[in-house]
Amino acid sequence: YWLPQIARAYYLILNAQAEERQFYGLRDFYEIIKLLSRSRNLTPHALDHAVLRCFGGQSKTLDTNRRIFFEQVFGDAKQMPIAKPNTLQLVAAALHDNNARHLMLMTRDLSCLLMLMGKGLLKGLHTDVLFHGAATDQSYVVESINRIKSAMAKGLTLILVNAEPIFESLYDLLNQRYIIRTFNNGEKIRMARLTLGSKSQLCVLAPSFRLLVIVEEAKALDELDSAFLNRFEKLVLNPISILDTRSNLIVESLEKWVNEIALEAKLPLSKCFAGLIPNDLISIASLLQVLIGFDSNNINENIETQARQVLTELAHPIAIMRSQSFNCIDYFQNRSSLRVLIQANSPEAQPVFILTLSSSLTTSGLKVISIGAVVDEQLLRREITKYLQALNNELLVLHVNAEMVQQVCYLVDVILASAVKKKTIAVVVTISTERAIIFRPKPWVYLFIDDVRGSVRIDDSLEDFAMTDINNECLERCLTSAVALTFSGPGSTTANGIDEFASRLNNARNVIYDTEASALVRDGILQIFKTSPPGYHIELALNSLNVGSLRQSMSLVFDTLVARAFACVLASVDSFQNLSLLLLEDEKNDGREETKEDLPHIWWSLAQDSAIRDFNVSAISIRALRGDSAVSTPRRGPYPATFPF
């Protein structure tokens, strides 16, 4: 009795579609009839369930489709249930319905695979997950087809992820019109055809075989062929689509909190938190879902606090410094290097997910494997297994292309689940401003470090920072700035004045390459740095951070501070052209018995006195930090106070 009403509803929905994109078709109409035929009575809940499964797949038209069906079948939409069935319940029903079409899940950033695993919907099903990606190489396509063929014969639930290049091979399989082959012993098997270009092959198909295709929602709506879409039962599944009222309130509260921090820091949200995109709740929703185990019944009073703690670890350094909402005393110490960051946050060998601005990594103490646009699963499995079995203290870091993140993380989960020995594995991803972060369930730990190249350390003490970084290369890099701050120019424009000034410049350069002189300069710079306030260099770096990473900014700030301190040391050491005495050529001294070669020895003997070597630290450090010029006077007098004379 309800068939004419269902047909009218389908006709209205069909006419409402854009002519060039027939998202729904006759297969959806036939499927809803099959579903409703199984119900003894056509109840509102039975109709709603059938409509959601057969005419879902588009978030913007879902409620309209429901209303049309209820108006045609029941006369009005008042009987339409207020609360829709949870999408996860619809997915579970479709996966366990052997008479249903194969299933397509449209999602964001492949988040639904995590949800299926986190919710346990794949338990009890023998599954194989095939990530194909964008590779179109013939051998890669053949390998994927062979895996599909194997899954069909074994009766697995095969999950295809980002497998658009092989969709054309599946049309006959998706038609569900099977060939039955009967053997002499009476055994019957089902067979379906897989195609590859102009070739095709009949393949054994076990009755329990199910196909689940996961695609990006935007790609499904805009790019996939309508004939392909119509062969599937289509559902939208992402962390936002399953939010209920309680969960939604927490997500909105967290969104307000991160936006307040961005306002305090006077920066866009994406410059305050790695992986968060303005006006997009997908990341926050996915974080909440993994914290509550995809079940709003697990929400408690501490959930929002836990979520804030996770998001704090993804904050940019500039947000940490500028916002009053953070209290992260150990933020910079724990990020002094990539290895320190991993070890500090994975005490029990948890897998670690790290976002960074770096396009390259330091390899000190790390085994780094870079993964590009295609993942060789077998090779990666071997490398991870070898690492887990090794006895050394090396840490494995997988530097992954953003497109391959979910595939690599899935493989890490699978391998660690069956591993006897647990070791930390870090997945490092360079941030994409257009890609939101999708959180994985525990035990994954999420972190952000702006730069992991290791060329510049982050430390609260400028003196400690400088101890290992002030070398001849650094002094040479800063020499020009130091000389510009120290020597204002020739004392006169005469030939002698210009020659004297040129000699002073040459002497300053020679200091770098004289072992004792360069050590003296480094000692003087360190004395100046000892008096600087804690974290002073970090504060300067953050104040000048407009683009790039904190470490890049700190490199510039560090060179600036070294140049200023170097200038102050030069001003003291070269008062009255002392360096001309230190760096004399070997020649006789006006017929006297001692040679000029003796003067450096006398110079250094006097310079060892701590009072002489003090460099007037308190005054010098103030000038160094302010950046004032530290002018060295070229005046000569009868009783000059020189260094070290």
Image (cartoon, rainbow, N blue to C red):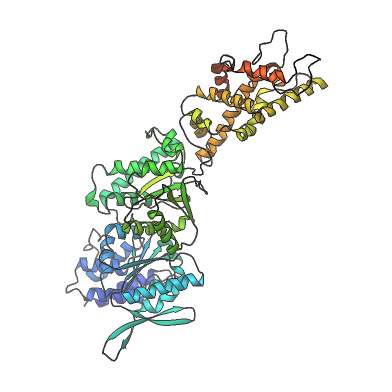
The x, y position of residue 273, in whole percent, is: 42, 43
Q: Is residue 630 above or below residue 30?
A: above
Q: Name the residue located 69 percent from the left edge and 8 percent from the top edge.
A: 639
User: Residue pushed farthest left?
Assistant: 40
- Examine the image and state in which quarter residue 311 appears: top left
Give the side of residue 307 with respect to residue 359, left or right.
left
Residue 25 or residue 552, whichever sits in front: 552
User: Residue pushed farthest right?
Assistant: 495
Q: Name the residue located 29 percent from the left edge and 46 percent from the top edge.
A: 249
Q: Quadrant of the N terminus?
A: bottom left
The x, y position of residue 278, in whole percent, is: 43, 47
Residue 257 or residue 553, whichever sits in front: 553
Residue 360 or residue 520, whichever sits in front: 520
User: Residue pushed farthest front?
Assistant: 593
Asked if residue 19 can be seen in this view, the reply is: no
- Examine the image and state in which quarter residue 91 appears: bottom left
The x, y position of residue 283, in whole percent, is: 37, 50
Q: Quadrant of the C terminus?
A: top right
Q: Name the residue located 62 percent from the left edge and 31 percent from the top edge.
A: 475
Give the side of residue 523 with respect to residue 418, left or right.
right
The x, y position of residue 395, in whole percent, is: 42, 48
Give the side of residue 543 with respect to residue 441, left or right.
right
Count of marks overlaid on the render: 0
Asked if residue 91 can be seen in this view, the reply is: yes
User: Residue pushed farthest bottom?
Assistant: 184
Q: Is residue 625 above or below residue 394?
A: above
